Image (tube, rainbow, N blue to C red):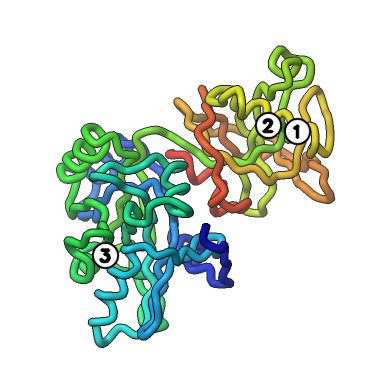
Amino acid sequence: MAKRIKSPLRYAIQWRDSLKFVDMTYSGFADLLLNSNEKYYLSEKIDGELNTLIYEKETNPYFITKSGVIRNRDYPVLKEYKDILDKIKNINDIVIAGELKAVHDGQHYPFNQSQSIIQTGAVEKVRHFPFDIYRLNGKQIRTDFPTIEKFFHNKKYINIPKWVYGGVDEFKKLWNQIVTQGKGEGIVAFSPSKPKIMYRIKHVLTADVVVVTIGKEGEKAWNKGQAGYLKLALLDENDNFLLTSKVGTGFTKKLRIELFEYAQKNYIESKDGDLWISPEIIVEVKYRRHRFVKVPLLKYSNKKYTQIGISDGVIMDQTSFTRFRKDKRLSHKDLSTIQFPI
């Protein structure tokens, strides 16, 4: 297995933080397009590992994840990038934002399998999906898909996400192709007039949240040595905790046992049958609908949660656990109420 090496560079986080992401429903975004005279760049949403390709002339390129982990295995996609960029005389260095993803015969692997392949599996299955040139010759820039096409059109391992430019008709056609027929996750969109506002239109409503309690003592699952549910929170602008819904479905028996054991070893307070834990586990949940309501606001300090008031938050209905998100940070940028369509 390749040695895990970290870099102080955080271009993937810087790229993400340079943009504002707005989540919308299909109907909400269609209405936005109908009421706008603007056309948008619309592209498929890739469920991979967000990273940046780092290239400097006369050196070997590599990928860096959001957390700074270097991906520099003998990926054919890195050789493809080097072969292309070495030939372009006016590029001395470049940083390209994209998603690393495992693909075989045109089929995308599920996220967890894809991550395993990226780290230790068959390198020829790894593809990079570029969607923005973040830096060029030392300067921060912003690009569109026609520019990316000029560099990387029709390559074997560099796969530009499917994209179109247009309004509501083009959006509906791409949605049908990507989501309805292709069972994809959704579409990402931005307007040339406001390139730093990125709209995410998802097929299934999901949210990233942090786990604050594991419960519940005395209940049926707990008495079998299994966690029954997780209580969740979002973060406000000051990185305080907005309590939201709990999630009790979507777990395997094995995972329930692991969560139970984690709670036993790591809880910081037991209250009303719930074991409160430090805010270290970030998960993705899917849900049916959501409501904007007032919720308890908590501050975490010295391994203790203290309620400091009531604030504007979100409650989700019919939540279900999807996966752990080790690629997300405990920050307002990743875990805010902005994730929820208005």
Q: Which residue is mark 1?
A: 263
Give residue 88's position: percent from left, percent from top: 24, 82
Residue drawn at (57%, 48%), measured in percent from left and top?
Answer: 326
Residue found at the far top of this picture: 220
Residue drawn at (77%, 47%), measured in percent from left and top?
Answer: 300
Residue drawn at (45%, 25%), measured in percent from left and top?
Answer: 288
Q: Which residue is mark 3?
A: 144
Mark whose residue sits in front, 1 or 3: 1
Task: Look at the numbered disc 3 and give the secondary structure of its residue.
Answer: loop
Q: CA distance from mark 2 to mark 1?
A: 6 Å
Give residue 170's position: percent from left, percent from top: 16, 45
Dots 3, 2 in contact, CB < 8 A: no
> What is the quadrant of the C terminus in the image?
top left
Foreground: 80 or 200? Answer: 80
Give residue 220's position: percent from left, percent from top: 71, 12
Q: Amino acid at mark 3?
A: Asp
Mark closer to the chain start, 1 or 3: 3
